[in-house]
Image (cartoon, rainbow, N blue to C red):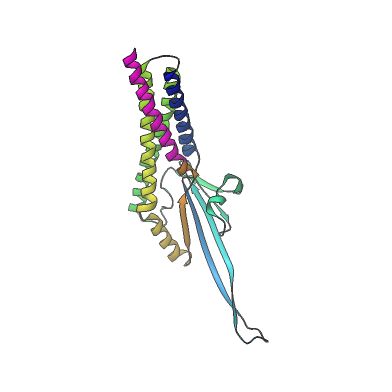
């Protein structure tokens, strides 16, 4: 009875970890961004029968572009800048037409136009490490799931240990990918350089709002369940070895 309960929870946590990691890997919403360029025109309206001067500001320009990026694609589309960025990127609220490019190389917002050659090449290397960690994590969690499925009808402690080790490895690599994403957005000044370039070359009132998306939020949940499942399978494998 104790074995069945432990295996049930270990399998449940492993399945949840696999689902969340695959959702994080397969959906392109690790990073969300909103670019806005506004032009305000002040119109002075003086009423003939009023003693005070009334000033009204009208917004005559509102060019907004939404971006979202993940492992596979970086997409952009237009919209109203006053919309909530999280709600705008909800699956049912996005337009049918989007401009998408492969995001295997430099992470957003680095490009050859907005950054120098050294920064661009460094971003490619940075993105490469992030992609490798993601692929290793996804591969490990899938292999771990297959090994655990094969081990379920038997009492082979080596299979449970191997599956548990792969789940722990998957959680570790996805955790590294999360850390790299946080460092890129919070500590490195790539976004600031991009904003300064856009202000000086495109729009003096250029503004940019960058935040994490659902894919990023799925990742730590998958890491938690994957690590927990891996530890349970390792303990089960160790106990089976002593028992048999």
**Residue 24 rendering spot, x and y as whole percentages:** 47, 39
**Residue 9 rendering spot, x and y as whole percentages:** 45, 26
Which residue is at 55% across, 49% downward? Answer: 89
Q: State whether residue 164 is above or below residue 98.
A: above
**Quadrant where the image shows the C terminus:** top left
Q: How many marks?
A: 0
Q: Which image quadrant is residue 168 in?
A: top left
| Of 239 and 234, the residue lying toward us | 239
**Residue 74 rendering spot, x and y as whole percentages:** 49, 46
Which segment is the magenta one?
Answer: 218-244
226 in magenta: yes
Judged left or right of residue 236, residue 18 is right
Judged left or right of residue 110, residue 85 is right
| Of 79 and 45, the residue lying toward us | 45
Q: Which image quadrant is residue 135 in?
A: top left
**Residue 178 rendering spot, x and y as whole percentages:** 39, 43
Q: State whether residue 43 is above or below residue 186.
A: below
Judged left or right of residue 19, residue 237 is left
| Of 154 and 129, the residue lying toward us | 154
Which residue is at 57% across, 55% downward? Answer: 78
Q: State whether residue 42 is above or below residue 66.
A: below
Determine the main secondary structure of the stretch shown in magenta: helix
């Amino acid at each position: 009875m104790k074995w069945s309960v432990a295996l049930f929870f270990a399998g449940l946590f492993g399945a949840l970890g696999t689902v969340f990691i695959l959702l994080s890997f397969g959906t392109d919403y690790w990073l969300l961004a909103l670019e806005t360029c506004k032009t305000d025109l002040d119109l002075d309206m003086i009423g003939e029968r009023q003693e005070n001067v009334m000033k009204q500001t009208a917004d005559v320009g509102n060019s907004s572009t939404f971006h979202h990026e993940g492992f596979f694609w970086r997409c952009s589309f237009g919209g109203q800048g006053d919309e909530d960025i999280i709600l705008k990127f909800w699956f049912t609220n996005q337009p049918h037409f989007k401009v998408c490019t492969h995001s295997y190389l430099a992470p957003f917002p680095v490009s050859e136009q907005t950054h120098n050659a050294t920064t661009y090449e460094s971003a490619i290397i940075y993105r490469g490490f992030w992609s490798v960690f993601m692929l290793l994590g996804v591969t490990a969690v899938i292999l771990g799931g297959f090994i655990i499925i094969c081990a379920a009808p038997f009492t082979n402690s080596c299979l449970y240990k191997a599956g548990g080790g792969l789940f722990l490895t998957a959680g570790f690599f996805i955790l590294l990918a999360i850390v790299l994403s946080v460092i890129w957005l919070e500590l490195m000044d790539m976004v600031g350089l991009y904003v300064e370039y856009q202000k000086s070359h495109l729009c003096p009132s250029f503004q940019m709002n960058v935040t994490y998306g659902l894919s990023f939020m799925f990742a730590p949940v998958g890491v938690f369940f994957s690590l927990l499942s891996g530890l349970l399978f390792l303990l089960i494998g160790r106990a089976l070895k002593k028992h048999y």
